[in-house]
Amino acid sequence: MRYGRRVYVDMRPTGEVIFHEGYLNSKDAARAALAGSPAVSLRLMVAHAIAGSGLWQVRTEPQTCRNDLVDESIENVPGEADFDHMRRKAL
């Protein structure tokens, strides 16, 4: 079988087996190429995250709580301060 082809096996109730051979469509071929190249897949994912896409959404986490004490506790965690510092640096 040549590269880029697909085979479907049709097994009938009578015991007859039929093989259907066909080429990959462009969508399946692109998907297969991405599966074999993680670096390209990562670049494509980042491009969708930055530029926006109907297939990808990025939203900020609201970080809210109904309890004021818990909300204040979360704001004072050292990790939250580090994250806020890095966010301001990036902006």
Image (tube, rainbow, N blue to C red):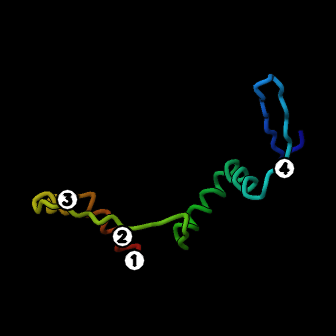
Identify residue for label 4.
Answer: 23
User: Sequence order check: which comes first, mark 3 or mark 4?
Assistant: 4
2 or 3: mark nearer the eye: 3
- Identify the residue shown where x is 85% and y is 46%: 22
Identify residue for label 3.
Answer: 74
Q: Amino acid at mark 1?
A: Leu
Q: The C terminus appears in which quarter of the rendering? A: bottom left
- Identify the residue shown where x is 23% and y is 58%: 78
User: Sequence order check: which comes first, mark 3 or mark 1?
Assistant: 3
1 or 4: mark nearer the eye: 4
Which residue is at the far top? 15
Q: Amino acid at mark 3?
A: Ile
Which residue is at the far front? 14
User: Sequence order check: which comes first, mark 4 or mark 2?
Assistant: 4
Q: Where is residue 85, by image quadrant?
A: bottom left
Marks 3/1: CA distance?
22 Å
Q: SS of the residue at dot 4?
A: strand
Marks 3/4: CA distance?
55 Å
- Identify the residue shown where x is 80% and y is 22%: 15
* Residue 57 on image: x %, y %: 47, 66
Identify residue for label 1.
Answer: 91
3 or 4: mark nearer the eye: 4
